[in-house]
Image (spheres, rainbow, N blue to C red):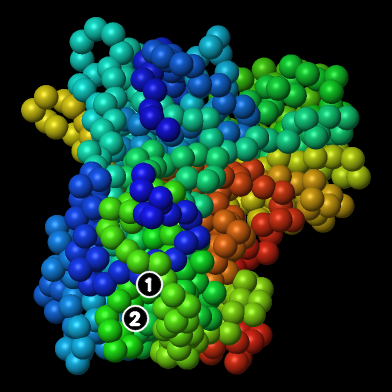
Amino acid sequence: MDPETRMLPGEVRVFDPAGLERLVEALVEAGYRVLGPTVRDGAIVLDEIASAGELPHGWTAEQDAARYRLRRRDDDAMFGWAVGPHSWKQHFLPARARLWRAAAPAGQGPPTIEEEPPPERPLALLAARPCDLHAIAIQDRVLLEGRYVERDYALRRRDAFVVVVNCGVPGGSCFCASMGTGPRAERGYDLALTEVLDGGHRFVVEVGSARGAELLAAVGTSPAREEDLAAAHAVTDEAVFRMGRSLDTAGLPELLAANLEHPRFAEVAERCLTCGNCTAVCPTCFCTSVEDVNDLADGSAERWRVWDTCFSIDYSTIHGGSVRRSSRARYRQWLTHKFGTWVDQFGTSGCVGCGRCITWCPVGIDVTEELAAIRARDGEVDRALAR
Amino acid sequence: MTPVPHRVRSRVRETHDTWTLELESLAEPIRPRAGQFDMLYAHGVGEVPISVSGDHEGALTHTVRAVGAVTSALCSLEPGALVWVRGPYGNEWPLAEAVGRDLVVVAGGIGLAPLRPAIRHALAHREDYGVLSVAVGARTPADLLYVHEIEAWRARLDAEVDVTVDAATPGWRGRVGLVTKLIPGAPFDPENAVALVCGPEVMMIFVVRALVERGMPASRIWISLERNMRCGVGHCGHCQLGPTLICRDGPVYRADEVARLLEVREL
Ligand SMILES: Cc1cc2nc3c(=O)[nH]c(=O)nc-3n(C[C@H](O)[C@H](O)[C@H](O)COP(=O)(O)OP(=O)(O)OC[C@H]3O[C@@H](n4cnc5c(N)ncnc54)[C@H](O)[C@@H]3O)c2cc1C
Ligand code: SF4
Ligand code: SF4
């Protein structure tokens, strides 16, 4: 390899918007299925893209509780927004996935189970956010790093190439700075981009892995100067102060464990529709159910894994009925799991502060507000629950 | 995590709604230990967690109460029929830790199924334990599981086996009343006993209370919990009880570690 273009992890380079075009091309050429943000139906969503032309040029999104609006920017920024309704879990842990097929039990010898083949192409994530990387690491913890490996997730997740884009324009619902998950990615990526718009339009790129370096060699970059680095840091340093929300995380697991019968749960339950939107958009929520289906024609059977939500009454059904009948109990399960018992179960918080659950809750319930309310009235007990 | 095909070797009717299946593996055998469970899949119908209820010449033994679609499908399988099984999952009854102590077993309803391998183990290794005190409760005499085996246990001189029903029917000459009532008179030494309890959750709460009242520390009482389970391996989220996942950290718990959680309504 030309010594001029040989790069190492840790190195910082710069490219212009044309470089971004070449980055997408290089990923496609390297055999990846490239997923990236694109504008559709009034939102920035994640989908397969073939060129940088499909990225959301000159768009931003205003976000607040129960509110999301696309707006034109007065510049040509490609990443001038935070996160949309989609998260990468839709690709690593799809809402519906067939896990295997089993032939009819008739005939000689044992029937066999045919597991789904691995995806043909590994995924490349273009413009994952720092909070998204943390969310992926959390799902890895649950599905790959316990005693048992989730095969389907492992196959989809394996070899995924990650281009993270550090955040310069946090959304009104974002609180990653409070959760320690953004707005700047520290690790877990192949390439980390920061979009700099101070006059010229350029991308400062940090190399996070050997294959990141290899891919970047095909893009055509120049070495980063000190002012490029400073400009990139300024973008994320300022973003910290532009977070729409914040959360006091001190001792949250203990606070919640001590307040399971707090009156706030009944209060929020009066507003909560138990629709499960929050769990669907949350990038860490991993709960699934199985559907076993039977082909009446040939007697074969299939198993599907489908997203489930702790807001459904069936989720906790055992013989004799649902354990969490009231919406109060179901909201409590969601909140205390995310911010409390997740730590007991998996050694990490279940929230990365992306704000999706706040933006996409139809009635605007805000986890940061709920937690602050419980903290403000720490120790109060719902009288209706006293035995 | 992929189901292993099994054939039903035998099917025995225990009660009007409960059957014991012996399953023979057509591939790798699955060897659960007392307290653990398997995921049993009725082809094309669905998959449910079922505790191991015995061990017999290399076959897998499960006792299933038909309460819904999947359990009914399992109970209606004839010898030779196919069942898919994955496992074993979950933890075991603390039979090794109980060595040298009195062993108290309290079962309610289908809760006797997961306890039967523990009782059989204690009877087979009788010298390892002090007093062996078994209390079995059922709703009615017709709901009693393993009647012949219980009779054989009762005939032994080295075990105290007591049976009670909530409601007697004509011809029943045994005890009537909740299983908790057997605890004050059971012949074990609370200072030196280990208790294994399984049954409906409210029953377990009251049994733990009665045992504690007899002077047993809750840390030597073990209960087996049930929640909805989809995967059995800690991935689906359904079996959470506060900080624990029952399929992964249980189903067997030390009573003092979950007492607080069981007191919270709808947790
Ligand atoms: C660790 C463990 C061990 C068990 N051991 C035994 C045993 O040895 N013998 C026995 O008879 N039963 C046992 N059970 C209970 C048994 O799993 C349920 O009775 C069974 O799942 C009910 O399924 P169904 O479809 O027949 O019932 P339905 O009444 O049709 O169920 C209705 C719905 O409730 C759900 N459901 C009910 N209970 C459960 C459950 N526990 N897990 C998942 N879904 C559930 C089903 O998904 C179904 O959709 C055990 C449960 C657990 C968690
Ligand atoms: S709980 Fe809400 S803010 Fe936290 S990661 Fe999930 S969706 Fe994002
Ligand atoms: S908190 Fe909001 S999004 Fe979540 S279930 Fe309730 S109403 Fe739906």
The answer to which quarter of the image holds residue B248 is top right
The answer, for residue B212, to whether it is visible in the render is yes
Q: Which residue is mark 2?
A: A196
* Contact, mark 1 vs mark 2 (Cβ under 8 Å): yes
On residue B80, which mark appears? none
- Tell me the element at label 1: strand
The answer to which quarter of the image holds residue B222 is top right
- Look at the picture and state if A265 lies above or below A191: below
Position of the C terminus of chain A, as image quadrant, is bottom right
On residue A204, which mark appears? 1
Q: Provide residue A370's location: percent of width, then percent of height.
A: 48, 85
Q: Chain of mark 2?
A: A
Give the side of residue A249 with respect to residue A225, left or right: right
Q: Chain of mark 1?
A: A
Position of the N terminus of chain A, as image quadrant, is top left
Callout 1 and callout 2 share a chain? yes
Instruction: Identify which residue is drawn at 15% across, 61% down.
Output: A51
Q: Are there few (<14), some (14-19), or many (20+) residues within 10 Å of tag 1?
A: many
Sequence order check: which comes first, mark 1 or mark 2? Answer: 2
Q: Foreground: A38 or B23?
A: A38
- Look at the picture and state if B183 lies above or below A7: above
- Tell me the element at label 2: strand
Give the side of residue A242 with respect to residue A377, left or right: left
Q: Provide residue B41's location: percent of width, then percent of height.
A: 35, 31
